[in-house]
Amino acid sequence: MTFTLSYRLTGTGWAECSLSDGQASCVIRASYLSDCLLNLVLAATAVASGFTRVSFRFDEEPGEYRWVITSPRLNEIELEILSFDELWGGRPDDEGRSLFKTRCLPEVFAKTVHDVAQQLLAEHGETGYLAKWVEHPFPSVQLSELNRLVRTAQHVG
């Protein structure tokens, strides 16, 4: 079960996220209308903490990409990216168009998100990140907690 993720700021208030599992891949964009990186870090924290379901969105103007993460079995998560044409439509998951679906270990997802966020912080710094993302600061406190959980999982495993 391989899982890769990249996240980069592409312009003022815009980001691009690429996901792959070696079989399928997906590229989605997001605007500053939602705090995408914070949501991603919080989801990874939830996954590392044993939550069995978490979902959040990347707002794309005018659409929405909804990330749905469930835990169908012990020590496994299923990640699905759903696309909706309408922003803030609040449509049920089953009305979304599936763009990407994969399974991986919770610690793989958490570590991958952690590493991506650390890379963004190293590249932009907190001040540079805020200048480029505009509406939301870098999620330093939340990344610190994710870092703690990732380190703990590495010592246990």
Image: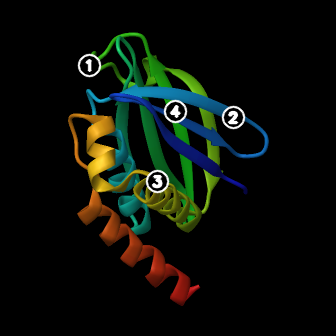
Q: Is the Cβ of the residue at disc 1 closer than 8 Å to that at disc 2?
A: no
Give the mark, 4 or 1, whose residue is nearer the N terminus. 4
**Residue indicated by mark 1:** 88
Q: Secondary structure at mark 3?
A: helix
Q: Position of residue 71 (x, y in %)?
A: 50, 55
Give the mark, 3 or 2, whose residue is nearer the N terminus. 2
Residue at image point 54% right, 68% down: 107
Give the mark, 4 or 2, whose residue is nearer the N terminus. 2
The circle on residue 53 is none
Q: Position of residue 102 (x, y in %)?
A: 64, 44
Q: Secondary structure at mark 1?
A: loop
Three-letter amino acid code at disc 1?
A: Trp
Q: Is the Cβ of the residue at disc 3 closer than 8 Å to that at disc 2?
A: no
Residue at image point 54% right, 37% down: 80
How far apart marks 3 and 2 lie (CA) works out to 24 Å
Give the side of residue 90 with respect to residue 46, left or right. Answer: left
**Residue indicated by mark 2:** 25
**Residue indicated by mark 3:** 123
Q: Nearer the viewer, residue 38 or 1?
A: 38
Q: Secondary structure at mark 2?
A: strand
Give the mark, 1 or 3, whose residue is nearer the N terminus. 1
Does residue 51 appear in this view? no
Dividing the picture into quadrants, the one containing residue 95 is: top left
Q: Is the Cβ of the residue at disc 4 closer than 8 Å to that at disc 1?
A: no
How far apart marks 4 and 3 lie (CA) works out to 26 Å
Residue at image point 28% right, 32% down: 34
